[in-house]
Image (tube, grey):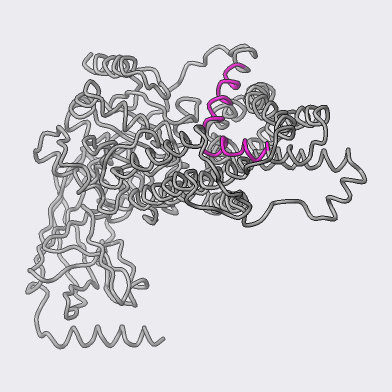
């Protein structure tokens, strides 16, 4: 109530104190922008005097302590036209944060548009009003003002069946109006009737799943779990025979958990549920907490062990308690690694959502989990050998300390994934690399014996093996240091945030690399909607309709890039393949790139939230939207996925996944260029 009274009082004061009219602060120019024979945009251009600003349609007075009135567009009803969608604005507004809160506004010039459908071929007068808006500066506000006028509309032919709907317009507005509405006439991307390929044999699907499992083993979520397995079986196995048997049970548990959980989860949520899990804020924070917990345990802060009552019970009922512990370890492996393996598993399970059969994906999941189970089973057998080794020198504790530091470093991956997906901007590349630099520097100093943790025994002499590990850690730390100043760090591509996710939005660290873009009125118009990737020399769109509109204006094919913030191979492609001297010129001058992030958590407008039969779930955010499109058109959910398309959404090439070979990727691009020219 206090804010409301202050708000009303300030309006009254500002309006009466100035004694000036609206035209002393802003002059409106109204034009009709023809889209096609039956559709047009009403363009409201306001030229603002220096020092003042008008509020954006995105501005929310409730988030600015009740200040700032947003323009309201009113149109007198008429049988001659109908409104299509909502008003939207051109260009990105200025974002300002102060003691009152967050404001969005335009200075010098503001352009708003409203699409209409003309229902008559005769000339008519359209009455409208721009009402209850304010203009403000640092000292205060003037208004609210009302501007009412009319404009002549002629030269249109009403369509018998309108091809544009309000839904098309909402989607075309690209985050509620950051772009030119000419994109609304772009035909919706046609659902391509993909020819159903012959079902692969179960053997081929099994092999594909097995290879995917081997790839998953090399992810930062999976690999650090191996030492935990070794530690667990070291404590639980009293004899070599018992260790081997429990290791086999452990491997079987991995297979059982992955196959069962994968099929049930897909049946319940569809393939997009896996992607949501991999970028869900709470799950990633839980994964981060688990890794930090493991790291502190390795560093000697405490030991992770079952309650003593459970241990006593397992001693009394060895078989039952032992197997439960083994199953728990296998389940923990699956839970913690799901952030990295989710997209890989999703590609295998998408067949279940499209065919309605769970037998085929179950075979793929068997191959996937078997690839994980075999190495973990072999490592679980090794504890029997470790138990027979002498414990003098504390070398085993040194291994745990090193692994603890590695766990701390990898824990940041989960924070980075959610930071990128939700656009928080908290963990920039500079902070990430700085923490890694310090951790590996500490690791090198520790291995040289200059630091000691709890449970460490004195280091009397430095072995060659220990020295080599220390040398590697220190060299790696030095390698990381230039990354804080923009240098490429290809060894950690996909783990660290991309170079474009820097504190200054990549303006300082890119070194002034040329984008190869011809600077003209078209490129200048869309520059604000393009985003640098890789080394900053390649620009991409994140909205397909915008990319399509720009591609039409430039007469270029579109490289469709289904990607993800948490996709490691996507970052590797951008930093290693796209920046190659043979590939870079093609991407800069011969293509318009639409990078669609399938794990982008930006909420969709309420009008676009819907249930998808394809994804078997609600489409709630931008990532869901692109993921649904990928599944529908390409029957796949792997990222990255690349395909060249024309302006109508027709494929010009086959879709390809991660392709690190330069010649193969260049051949793929050249095929798209050749097909587009035809």
In-front residue for pair 285/72: 285
Q: Main secondary structure of the magenta part?
A: helix
Judged left or right of residue 51, residue 288 is right
Judged left or right of residue 494, residue 548 is left
Does residue 609 show up?
A: no
Q: From the viewer's perspective, is residue 46 above or below residue 358? A: below
Judged left or right of residue 216, residue 21 is left
The residue most toward the right is: 316
Q: From the viewer's perspective, is residue 651 above or below residue 523? A: above
Quadrant position of residue 653: top left
Task: Find the magenta span and give its range.
Answer: 207-230
The residue most toward the front is: 460
Which residue is at a point 39% across and 38% down the rendered structure image? 476
Q: From the viewer's perspective, is residue 277 above or below residue 361? A: below
Expressed as whole percent of the image width and height from the top left, the position of residue 380 reads 71, 31
Image quarter hosting the N terminus: bottom left
Does residue 44 show up?
A: yes
Expressed as whole percent of the image width and height from the top left, the position of residue 225 reads 61, 39
Image quarter hosting the C terminus: top left
In-front residue for pair 494/539: 494
Which residue is at a point 7% across and 69% down the rendered structure image? 50
Instruction: Report if residue 228 lies within the magenta region.
Output: yes
In-front residue for pair 130/250: 250
Expressed as whole percent of the image width and height from the top left, the position of residue 461 reads 53, 41
Q: How many marks?
A: 0
In-front residue for pair 513/189: 513
Q: From the viewer's perspective, is residue 226 above or below residue 196? A: below
Quadrant position of residue 240: top right
Which residue is at a point 40% across and 35% down the rendered structure image? 563
Expressed as whole percent of the image width and height from the top left, the position of residue 328 reads 74, 42
């Amino acid at each position: 109530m206090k804010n409301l009274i202050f708000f009303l009082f300030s309006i009254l004061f500002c309006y009466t104190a100035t004694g000036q009219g609206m035209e002393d602060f802003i002059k409106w120019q109204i034009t009709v922008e023809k889209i096609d024979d039956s559709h047009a945009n009403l363009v409201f251009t306001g030229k603002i005097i220096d020092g003042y600003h008008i509020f954006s349609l995105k501005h929310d007075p409730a988030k600015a302590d009740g200040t700032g009135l947003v323009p309201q567009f009113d149109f007198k009803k008429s049988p001659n036209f109908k409104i299509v969608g909502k008003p939207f604005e051109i260009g990105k507004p200025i974002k300002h944060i102060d003691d009152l809160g967050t404001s969005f506004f335009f200075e010098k010039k503001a352009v708003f548009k409203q699409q209409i459908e003309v229902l008559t071929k005769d000339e008519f007068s359209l009455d409208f009003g721009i009402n209850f808006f304010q203009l403000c500066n640092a000292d205060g506000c003037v208004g609210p003002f009302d501007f009412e006028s009319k404009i002549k509309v002629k030269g249109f032919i009403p369509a018998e069946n309108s091809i544009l709907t309000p839904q098309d317009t909402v989607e075309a507005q690209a985050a509620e109006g950051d772009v030119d509405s000419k994109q609304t006439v772009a035909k919706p991307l046609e659902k391509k009737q993909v020819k159903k390929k012959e079902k692969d044999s179960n053997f081929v699907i099994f092999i594909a799943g097995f290879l995917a499992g081997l790839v998953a083993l090399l992810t930062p979520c999976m690999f650090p779990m191996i030492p935990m397995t070794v530690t667990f079986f070291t404590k639980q196995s009293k004899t070599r025979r018992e260790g081997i048997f429990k290791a086999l049970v452990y491997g079987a548990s991995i297979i059982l958990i992955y196959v069962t959980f994968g099929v049930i989860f897909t049946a319940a949520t569809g393939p997009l549920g896996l992607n949501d899990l991999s970028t869900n804020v709470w799950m990633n924070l839980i994964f981060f907490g688990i890794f930090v917990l493991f790291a502190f345990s390795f560093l000697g802060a405490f030991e992770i062990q079952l309650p003593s009552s459970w241990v006593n019970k397992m001693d009394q009922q060895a078989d039952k308690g032992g197997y439960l512990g083994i199953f728990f370890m296998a389940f923990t492996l699956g839970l913690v690694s799901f952030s990295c393996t989710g997209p890989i598993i999703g590609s295998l399970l998408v067949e279940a959502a499209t065919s309605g059969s769970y037998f085929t994906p179950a075979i793929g999941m068997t191959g996937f989990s078997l690839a994980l189970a075999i190495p973990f089973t072999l490592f679980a057998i090794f504890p029997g050998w470790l138990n027979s080794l002498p414990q003098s020198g504390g070398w085993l504790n040194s291994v745990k300390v090193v692994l603890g530091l590695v766990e701390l470093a990898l824990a940041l991956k989960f924070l980075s994934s959610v930071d990128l997906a939700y656009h928080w901007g908290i963990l920039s590349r500079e902070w990430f690399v700085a923490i890694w630099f310090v951790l590996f520097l500490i690791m090198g100093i520790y291995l040289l014996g200059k630091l000691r943790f709890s449970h460490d025994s004195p280091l009397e002499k430095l072995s060659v093996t220990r020295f080599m590990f220390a040398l590697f850690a220190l060299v790696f730390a030095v390698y990381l240091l230039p990354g804080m100043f923009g240098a490429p760090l290809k060894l950690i591509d996909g783990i660290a945030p991309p170079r474009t996710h820097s504190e200054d939005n990549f303006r300082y660290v890119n070194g002034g690399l040329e984008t190869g873009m011809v600077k003209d009125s078209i490129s200048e118009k869309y520059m604000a909607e393009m985003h640098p990737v890789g080394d900053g020399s390649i620009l991409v769109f994140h909205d397909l309709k915008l990319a399509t509109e720009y591609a039409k204006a430039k007469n270029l094919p579109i490289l469709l890039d289904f990607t993800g913030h948490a996709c490691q191979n996507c970052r590797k492609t951008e930093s290693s393949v796209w920046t190659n001297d043979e590939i870079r010129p093609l991407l800069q001058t011969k293509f318009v790139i639409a990078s669609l992030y399938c794990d982008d958590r930006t909420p969709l407008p309420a009008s676009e939230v819907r249930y998808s039969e394809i994804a078997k779930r609600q489409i709630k955010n931008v990532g869901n939207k692109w993921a649904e499109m990928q599944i529908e058109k390409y029957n796949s959910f792997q990222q990255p996925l690349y395909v060249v398309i024309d302006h109508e959404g027709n494929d010009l090439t086959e879709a390809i996944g991660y392709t690190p070979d330069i010649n193969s990727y260049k051949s793929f691009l050249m095929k798209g260029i050749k097909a587009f020219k035809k």
